[in-house]
């Protein structure tokens, strides 16, 4: 989708802030991403130019259909990675959240698809009496992996 990691973060922020109302405010985006309002304005102008956001100064921000699709994909990748890190590897939620945020921008669809399959495999194995995720967590504790 040739968006920078920063623009993907903006899409994800708008998507998450908009929720059911489908609108976000630039000051809320700035607060969420811990950036200046002028940085938000610059990013929103770029997203508008790319056809991903509807933006006018001092008005609510909404995502276009293409913007919602792109944002949903970023959120999906983030959630897959966070799930893998917490549920399979046993990483603490805060650490997993930060790591997922960094990795979501670099891992392509093939890697994400494989991770999804692996998470599903591990989850199904636990239903079949062999909990691979728990076994792995115990293994790490024995090895004193933090």
Image (spheres, rainbow, N blue to C red):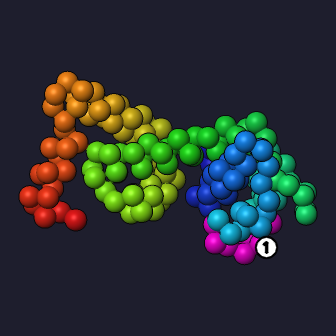
* Residue 38 is a magenta residue: yes
On the rendered structure, is 25 left or right of 79?
right
Residue indicated by mark 1: 38
Quadrant where the N terminus sits is top right
Residue 43 position within the rendered picture, expressed as x and y whole percent measured from the top left: 74, 62
Question: Looking at the image, which residue is at 14% across and 58% down?
Answer: 141
Q: Quadrant of residue 57?
A: bottom right
Q: Quadrant of residue 119?
A: top left
| Picture mark count | 1
Residues shaded magenta:
33-41
Residue 34 position within the rendered picture, expressed as x and y whole percent measured from the top left: 64, 72
Pick whichever, 1 or 104, lies toward us.
104
Question: Looking at the image, which residue is at 56% across and 45% down?
Answer: 75
Question: Looking at the image, which residue is at 61% across and 57% down?
Answer: 9
* Residue 89 is a magenta residue: no
Residue 6 position within the rendered picture, expressed as x and y whole percent measured from the top left: 62, 61
Badge 1 marks a residue whose secondary structure is helix
Q: Quadrant of residue 46?
A: bottom right
Q: In this rendering, does residue 114 appear at all?
A: no
Quadrant where the C terminus sits is bottom left
Residue 19 position within the rendered picture, expressed as x and y whole percent measured from the top left: 69, 45
On the rendered structure, is 62 left or right of 84?
right
Above or below — where is 82 with respect to 70? below
On the rendered structure, is 88 left or right of 57?
left
Q: In this rendering, does residue 29 appear at all?
A: yes
Question: Looking at the image, which residue is at 20% across and 24% down?
Answer: 128
Pick whichever, 85 or 20, lies toward us.
20
Main SS type for the magenta part? helix
């Amino acid at each position: 989708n040739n968006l920078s990691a920063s623009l993907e973060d903006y899409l994800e922020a708008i998507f998450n802030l908009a929720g059911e109302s489908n609108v976000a405010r630039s000051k809320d985006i700035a607060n969420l991403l811990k950036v200046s309002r002028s940085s938000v304005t610059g990013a929103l102008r770029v997203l508008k130019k790319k056809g991903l956001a509807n933006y006018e100064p001092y008005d609510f921000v909404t995502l276009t259909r293409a913007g919602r699709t792109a944002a949903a994909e970023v959120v999906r990748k983030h959630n897959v990675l966070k799930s893998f890190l917490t549920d399979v590897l046993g990483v603490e939620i805060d650490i997993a959240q930060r790591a997922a945020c960094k990795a979501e921008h670099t891992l392509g669809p093939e890697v994400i698809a494989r991770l999804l399959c692996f998470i599903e495999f591990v989850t199904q194995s636990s239903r079949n009496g062999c909990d691979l995720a728990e076994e792995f967590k115990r293994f790490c504790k024995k090895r004193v992996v933090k």
